[in-house]
Image (cartoon, rainbow, N blue to C red):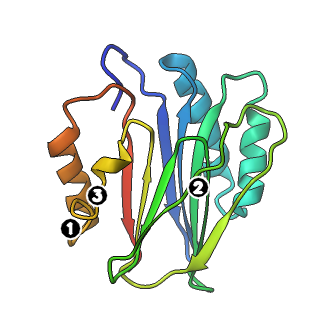
Amino acid sequence: MAKKGNYYCGDSYFYKETEEAFVCALADGLGSGESARESSKAVMEVIEANPSLTIENLIKKCNEVLVGKRGVVLGILRIDFQNETYSYSSIGNIGVITITPDGERKRSIPLAGYLAGYRRELRVTRGKVSKGMKFLLFSDGVHDRRLSKHSTEAKSVEMITENYKLLYGQTRDDDTTLIAMEYV
């Protein structure tokens, strides 16, 4: 959802499932309005065209397309079905929370900064995925304190997003995107 007073939302996302893997990405263009949307859409087009690449290579290609543009913060999740592993990276204020089937929550600390066409260090978190594991990706319009243990204990990922929308969807001071996924 676009923040109040703006027609364009600077948040863009993409997801795709293939036989080998699942990839999901969320980008928030710097600033707001049409220029922010242009940057976030450019990054999503790169990911859409290259879903089989590793997270490191996807981020490198995304960074290249941002030369001369405003820049983005970015989070990418990739689940490898063959190896039953996940990997994710978050740059800037894109949040990632993992929730194991027994309710253990881990909130990643994103790498500071943003992508804007210059070389930068990356940090990729990796782990084993298990049936029932949930993943939440969210832009800075979602206040992570509102994603409390209580609000994310819902049986389905649909309920997590619906509950958040009902409780906080009317008061937006920034573009807001919350993506909830479950490995089944």
The picture places residue 73, in percent across and down from the top left corner, at 60, 38
Q: Count the marks.
A: 3
> Callout 2, which amino acid?
Ile
Residue reaching furthest to the left? 166
Q: What residue did someone put label 3 on?
A: 148
Mark earlier in primary sequence (2, 3): 2
Looking at the rendering, in which quadrant would you find the C terminus?
bottom left
Element class at badge 2: strand
Residue 20 shows up from this direction: no
Q: Disc number at residue 154?
A: 1
Q: Residue at x 33, y 49 (%)?
A: 145
The picture places residue 45, in percent across and down from the top left corner, at 62, 42
Residue 45 drawn above or below residue 100: above
> Callout 3, which amino acid?
Ser
Q: Residues within 10 Å of mark 2 (few under 14, many from 20)?
A: many
Horizontal side of 163 relative to 2 (left or right) equals left
Looking at the rendering, in which quadrant would you find the N terminus?
top left
Horizontal side of 120 relative to 94 (left or right) equals right
In contact (CB < 8 Å): disc 3 and disc 1:
no
Question: Camera-side residue: 109 or 38?
Answer: 109
**Marks 3 and 1, how far apart at CA:** 11 Å
Q: Residue at x 36, y 36 (%)?
A: 176
Q: Disc number at residue 76?
A: 2
